[in-house]
Image (tube, rainbow, N blue to C red):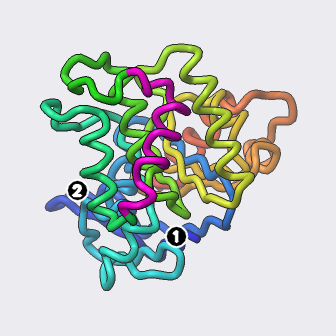
Amino acid sequence: MIEIKNLTKKYGKITAVDRLNLSVDRGEIFGFIGPNGAGKTTTISMMAGLLAPTSGSIKVCGIDMLLHPRLAKQKIGYIPDRPYIYEKLTAMEFLKFTADMFKMDSRNFETRAEAELIRFSLIDWADELIESFSHGMKQRLIMCAALIHDPEVVVVDEPMVGLDPSAIRMVRLLLKELAASGTTVFMSTHTLYIAQDLCDQIGVIHKGRLIARGTVEELKQRARVEKADLEQVFMILIENGELRIES
């Protein structure tokens, strides 16, 4: 569902993402973790078609993002870490704008929009201006918009930012339900216990390079620790990765 080959992004002399290779299967929740500045958000921006790579390729559902960006983007639901929304619209108007961007059948829009607003506890605010929403409500509305067209791939950058505990629980259950229904989820997060709980596979990126990938148990084996949580494994892998990169 996601195939990344030799993906590279440079800003002048700085290499933000360095020859990244990844593939993610249908119905898999893939966690993408790394320290600040490792290249997570840059990678996700390229996957979402918001940023052009310096070199390499990204395919979503077999569609090349560079050659056919519109077709590829229609397969993706993108949830950024910050809710960038035009706040003079109501929630329903914003969802209609989003649905039109994805060329969604207008006959199905209202039923679909109401279902998403109910799922994210926003139905009572459907006709209110977004400027009156809290940060958490805006983030939930962004999630509604990302799912309105029933995407095959969901790309999420820090999904739990600004959410209260009940909303975090709801999103965790939602991501599991999406994966169970065959939707592929690619998730960047700093919240390692969330990654450990949710993800089928985890990739560790450091200084733009993928330094490890596998299940939590496989990452423990690579870090040569048996009884440790993902945070301890992460720190060991980063330290080892630092040595390899510098050498």
Image spot of residue 22 (x, y percent): 56, 67
Please tell me the numbered disc located at residue 14. Answer: 2
Q: Is residue 227 above or below residue 241?
A: above
Image spot of residue 122 (x, y percent): 43, 26
Please tell me the numbered disc located at residue 21. Answer: 1
The reply to whether residue 243 is visible in this rendering is no
Q: Amino acid at mark 2?
A: Ile
103 to the left or right of 35: left
Point out the frontmost of discs 2 and 1. 1
155 to the left or right of 184: left
Q: Alpha-carbon neighbours of circle 1 within 10 Å: few (<14), some, or many (≥20)?
A: some
Start-end of magenta stretch: 106-124
SS of the residue under disc 1: strand
Q: Alpha-carbon neighbours of circle 2 within 10 Å: few (<14), some, or many (≥20)?
A: few
What residue is shown at x 47% (from left), y 54% (from top)? Answer: 245
Q: Is residue 15 above or below residue 61?
A: above
Please tell me the numbered disc located at residue 49. Answer: none
Q: Residue furthest right?
A: 226
Report the front residue among 235 and 78: 78
SS of the residue under disc 2: strand
